[in-house]
Image (cartoon, coloured by chain):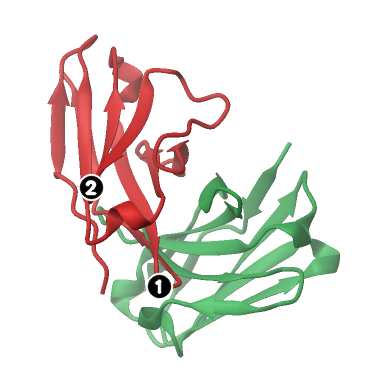
Chain colours: A green, B red
Amino acid sequence: QVQLVQSGAEVKKPGASVKVSCKASGYSFTDYNIHWVRQAPGQRLEWMGWINPGNGYTKYSQKFQGGLTITRDTSATTAYMELSSLKSEDTAVFFCARLAHSWNAFDYWGQGTLVTDSS
Amino acid sequence: SYDLTQPPSVSVSPGQTASITCSGDNLGDNFVSWYQQKPGQSPVLVIYQDDQRPSGIPERFSGSISGNTATLTISGTQAMDEADYYCQAWDSGTYVFGIGTKVTVL
């Protein structure tokens, strides 16, 4: 069965970086784009960007351009989301999600990773 | 930037029908998806391509679109349907979510 398993919760100081992983299993990793979505406490889902695991192509939301880097390791069937220069308002749950391209919808989601501000 | 408008909350009695709207400019030109999110959980896709239901999603969930307004309908609402519901569309290379609608089953 398709699974996306994310790394555990992180506590970070403002100005630091955080890197969250998303391990995929149960399907061909390179056949589906992986997207990242942020959800601040009590707020809406917010799309951040995506990666094509097959060729490494990435596209980022303008809001996160410059501070966001999405990468992948095909041998480990894992995608990564790194956010730099964290601010206190970056406290949020980050989700990875698989895009079913024929539907243009997110059909499987990771369990979410909470990143909190230590200040 | 593109925005999708949803009512913040909808209340419904058990067994009745809940309707959640989502409106946006030229929404009819793009497919709309709907997600259910319960507290502390990941979103679950309940409708894609405006009105298609993934396998495993109960038939009481249906979607429709008219002009620039999409609607998610829950027929015969059950207590387990109490959750936040988000619409989502694609516009100019970006993916946009609505603000979410909290469905309360009274």
Q: Is residue B30 above or below residue B18?
A: below
Q: Position of residue B11 (x, y in %)?
A: 13, 26
Q: Amino acid at mark 1?
A: Ser
Q: Is residue A51 above or below residue A30?
A: below
Local SS, label 1? loop
Relative side of A72 to A83, left or right:
right
Local SS, label 2? loop
Q: Residue furthest right?
A: A75
Q: Position of residue B12 (x, y in %)?
A: 16, 21
Q: CA distance from mark 1 to mark 2?
A: 19 Å
Q: Which residue is mark 1?
A: B92
Disc 2 crowd rating (10 Å Cα; few below 14, some 14-19, many 20+) is few
Disc 1 crowd rating (10 Å Cα; few below 14, some 14-19, many 20+) is few
Q: Quadrant of residue A44?
A: bottom left
- Quadrant position of the N terminus of chain A in the picture: top right
Q: Amino acid at mark 2?
A: Gly
Callout 1: residue from which chain? B
